[in-house]
Amino acid sequence: MLQQSIALGPMGFSIHQLLIGLAFLLALLAGALLGRRHRVAVSDTLFTLLLVALVGARLVFVLRYWGEYEGLLGRLDIRDGGFDIVGGLIAALAYAGWTLWRSPRQRVPLSGALLAGGLVWGLTTASATMIEHQSRPLPEVALTTRSGEPIDLPHLSRTTQQPMVVNLWASWCPPCIREMPVFEQAQDNEPGITFVFVNQGESLGQINAFMDEYGFSLKNVWQDPRNAIGQATGANAMPTTLYYDADGQLVSTHFGELSSATLQQGLERLR
């Protein structure tokens, strides 16, 4: 549920991103109200804390998957969504502790702001995680192969008896195109996992023309002309990648562009 997405015009956001934004806004509000009473501003400290958390989360993730990246630019490119939540929390708490020790005047408003934001984020995330752990099987949606034959995901799962990675994409989506070479390599390197690429909302002619133009050697490229899988899984923006175990149950979801590192993170949960 946390990685279900919402499309706002040309942009898309995951539920988790929106919850983080909400928690941060409430922290700013609480900090402003308490700061006015104690005549000290904490908004700059909160923005710095957020930056420290993001840098810490990215740094820890990159160190964990160092070998999956090619060069410095790949490690700096945060479009793959590669962040380690625990690393970010440790960095944020360390910075917050140092600030509270160094600046006694900020202690009350900053503590109140962190408490408000932390409670909102923690409670909403925990509730969403509990819902997420409920059984969510492969959607029973009629799809079509590139040759026009009817097919569906549960049938393929029963046939292969393998974990499955389902990628939702479209030819007009630049991040979808950028991550396809990553999937091509994964198909070759992971024979024990089935990869399926479900196009959302386009005709077979468009799909085949796109594949011929780019020359991608992807298997199991299917058509979903009515975006039925996106609606069934809450994936309203692309790209979205869904990870299912061998029993056809959803294990995790990644919203946004994938790198080799973030794909490996998802595959680890299937092993």
Image: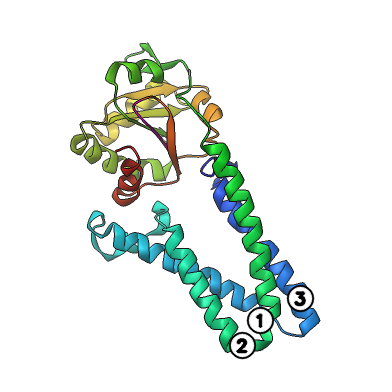
Q: What kind of residue is marked 3?
A: Leu
Q: Quadrant of residue 99?
A: bottom right
Residue at image position (66%, 78%) is 42
Q: Quadrant of the C terminus?
A: top left
Amino acid type at mark 1: Arg
Mark 2 vs mark 3, CA separation in Å: 15 Å
Question: What residue would you read off at disc 1?
Answer: 107
Check contact, mark 2 vs mark 1: CB within 8 A.
Answer: yes
- How many residues crowd around disc 3 within 10 Å: few (fewer than 14), some, or many (20 or more)? many
Which mark is on residue 34? 3
Give the spatial CA distance, label 2 vs label 1: 7 Å
- At mark 2, the secondary structure is loop
Towards the viewer: 175 or 75? 75
Residue 100 position, x and y percent, is: 59, 82
Q: Which residues are magenta?
A: 241-246
> Which quarter of the figure is the N terminus placed in?
top right
Query: In the rendering, which numbered label is found on residue 103?
Result: 2
Q: With respect to residue 101, does 131 lie above or below?
A: above
User: Looking at the rendering, which quadrant does residue 60 occupy?
Assistant: bottom left
Crowd tier of the residue under label 1, counting other residues whose Cα lies within 10 Å: few below 14, some 14–19, many 20 or above: many
Marks 2 and 3: CB-CB under 8 Å?
no
Q: Residues within 10 Å of mark 2 (few under 14, many from 20)?
A: few
